[in-house]
């Protein structure tokens, strides 16, 4: 027996959000400080989770299971392994930093903003730790609405349009996934009893045709969340209109629920269909890498440029997962964390300068190195991590992904490598125009450098960016056993003899 650590991690932000509602909204410092302090609780709990996690095991750890709807085989079931561990840590790590950063960004309805941030954190943690299919779906939908409120209330001029578009895209995919879940559970019940337990569902006997249709239902939901080309169109609008904190959480964690869904559900449950989908998934991922990079180049808005960079970077993750080898999957899982840190930090840096100038247009800046040197130096480090400079976090994940991709398909690896080059082009060009060159707008001369609070937000992220770039072993040690377990399921697909099947290898 052990303490229900996972339950405490999932629901401590939820109850903190309810507690926050009981506090006065004015002065704004009260909900700000309270939200930051309360957000540290799940982070501290997740550090305990990390300390007790056994890196040699590929199985679920800290499992909790309580009957929820016994007649339907539904349980409140939680567990963590190397696939979800670092995403849980990333969620609890970024949330208090986002709340601290929002002290200078959110001035109206502060208490409500903090409430939705904590509620969103609870939903994301629940989705990452659920190992019951119905429970996962419940959290998948619950985390949708706090983000929609964050965009719709505190966003930019087109916030309502962006929030509605975000909800419609995500809910549409989620409903398809729900249909797939119900069919999958009923198929499993024919031979083994009614259950929504993921670990039991892994052994469901399905024909190739069944796998193909169910994979399509799950994959569409996850592809929208990633988002994969051509289902990405909601993302630039959501990022552009969202407040800074919303953009950081959206890029840092929410998008990873899509790639997480592929590796947790689609690959191990539908291995035959996943391999057969190689000629579809990999080309779309490579197109996303190149398309995101090319469209990012001419963007006049820094935030929109970073948004399109996410489309490109998450294409790398998908290529890694579909390499079907240990370097590719391990690199893809690690790159989820790297992208959350680097792109989240980029959105923070864009948000800091927006608070000062109330514009994100690249042409409005120039010559900032001599005016705000601390800002410029931190921005440079974050930008270099995003383009994969050796010694920083982005390089390790991209290197492993490309290694796996070249082994699986040299053409895919070669085209994906071109995306690395294009990423360096648009990021370095943007940085040069914003930070160097002449001061073309006199208002820039009055800018003040990062405050102590803003530096305190960035330093922990920078530490992890360097740590992951120099010494990623502790992270990979906890990822690789679970990655091997996924590969074992993909390499030994389960299928009934009703339809003759053959393992399709890329």
Image (cartoon, helix red, strand yellow):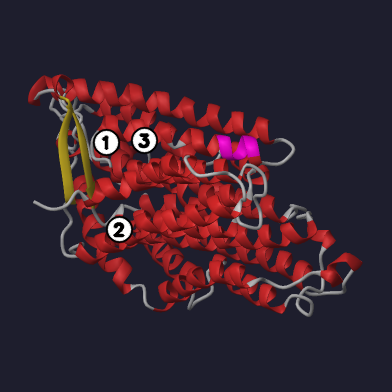
Residue at x-position 33% and y-position 61%:
44
Helix, strand or loop at label 1? It is loop
How far is the residue under mark 2 from the one under mark 1? 34 Å
Residue at 41%, 72% (x, y): give it.
Answer: 468
* Left or right of 177 on screen, residue 283: right
Specify whether 388 is left or right of 445. left
The residue labelled by disc 2 is 45
* Residue 139: mark in rendering: 3
| 2 or 3: tag closer to the N-terminus | 2
Which-is-in-front pick, marks 2 and 1?
2
**Quarter where residue 453 is shown:** bottom right
Mark 1 or mark 3, earlier in chain: 3
Q: Position of residue 421 (x, y in %)?
A: 60, 65
- Foreground of the two, 407 or 373: 373
Where are the magenta residues, as a range? Answer: 149-153
Which residue is disc 1 drawn over?
A: 270
Q: Earlier along the polypeptide chain: callout 2 or callout 1?
A: 2
Magenta segment, prevailing SS (helix, strand or loop): helix
**Numbered marks: total:** 3
Residue at position x 62%, y 66% in the image: 424
In which quarter of the view is residue 103 placed?
bottom right
Q: Return the residue nearer the eye: 23 or 173.
A: 23
User: In 3D space, how far apart are the residues under numbered discs 2 and 3 (Cα atoms)?
Assistant: 20 Å
């Amino acid at each position: 027996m052990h303490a229900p650590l996972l339950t405490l991690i999932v629901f401590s932000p939820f109850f903190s959000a309810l507690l926050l509602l009981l506090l006065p909204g004015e002065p704004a410092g009260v909900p700000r400080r309270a939200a930051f302090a309360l957000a540290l609780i799940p982070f501290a709990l997740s550090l305990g989770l990390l300390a007790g996690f056994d890196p040699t095991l590929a199985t679920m750890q800290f499992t909790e299971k309580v009957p929820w709807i016994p007649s339907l085989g539904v349980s409140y079931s939680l567990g963590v392994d190397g696939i979800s561990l670092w995403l849980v840590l990333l969620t609890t790590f970024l949330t208090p930093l986002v709340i601290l950063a929002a002290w200078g960004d959110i001035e109206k309805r502060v208490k409500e903003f903090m409430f939705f941030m904590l509620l969103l954190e609870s939903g994301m943690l629940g989705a990452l730790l659920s190992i019951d299919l119905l429970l996962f779906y419940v959290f998948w939908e619950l985390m949708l609405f706090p983000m929609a409120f964050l965009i719709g209330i505190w966003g930019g001029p087109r916030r309502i349009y962006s929030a509605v578009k975000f909800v419609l895209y995500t809910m549409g995919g989620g409903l398809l996934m729900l249909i797939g879940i119900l069919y999958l559970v009923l198929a499993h019940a024919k031979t083994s009893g009614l259950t929504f337990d993921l670990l039991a569902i892994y052994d469901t006997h399905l024909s190739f045709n069944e796998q193909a249709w169910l994979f399509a239902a799950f994959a569409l939901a996850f592809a929208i969340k990633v988002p994969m080309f051509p289902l990405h169109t909601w993302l630039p609008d959501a990022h552009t209109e969202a407040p800074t904190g919303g953009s950081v959480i959206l890029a840092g964690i929410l998008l990873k629920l899509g790639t997480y869904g592929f590796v947790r559900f689609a690959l191990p449950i539908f291995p035959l269909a996943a391999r057969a989908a190689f000629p579809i998934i990999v080309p779309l991922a490579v197109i996303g890498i190149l398309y995101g990079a090319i469209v990012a180049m001419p963007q006049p808005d820094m935030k929109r440029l970073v948004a399109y960079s996410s489309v490109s970077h998450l294409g790398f993750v998908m290529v890694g997962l579909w390499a079907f080898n240990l370097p590719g999957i391990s690199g893809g899982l690690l790159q989820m964390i790297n992208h959350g840190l680097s792109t989240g930090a980029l959105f923070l840096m864009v948000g800091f300068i927006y608070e000062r100038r109330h514009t994100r247009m690249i042409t409005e800046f120039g010559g900032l190195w001599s005016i705000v040197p601390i800002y410029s130096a931190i921005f440079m480090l974050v930008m270099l991590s995003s383009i994969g400079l050796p010694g920083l976090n982005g390089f390790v994940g991209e290197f492993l992904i490309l290694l796996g991709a070249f082994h699986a398909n040299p053409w895919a690896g070669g085209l994906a490598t071109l995306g690395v080059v294009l990423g360096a082009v648009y990021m370095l060009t943007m940085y040069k125009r914003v930070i160097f060159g002449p001061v073309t707008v006199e208002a820039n001369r009055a800018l003040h450098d990062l405050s102590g609070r803003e530096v305190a937000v960035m330093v922990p992220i920078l530490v992890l960016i360097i740590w992951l770039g120099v010494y990623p072993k502790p992270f990979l040690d906890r990822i690789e056993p679970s990655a091997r377990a996924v590969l074992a399921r993909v390499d030994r697909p389960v299928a009934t003899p009703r339809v003759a099947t053959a393992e399709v290898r890329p």
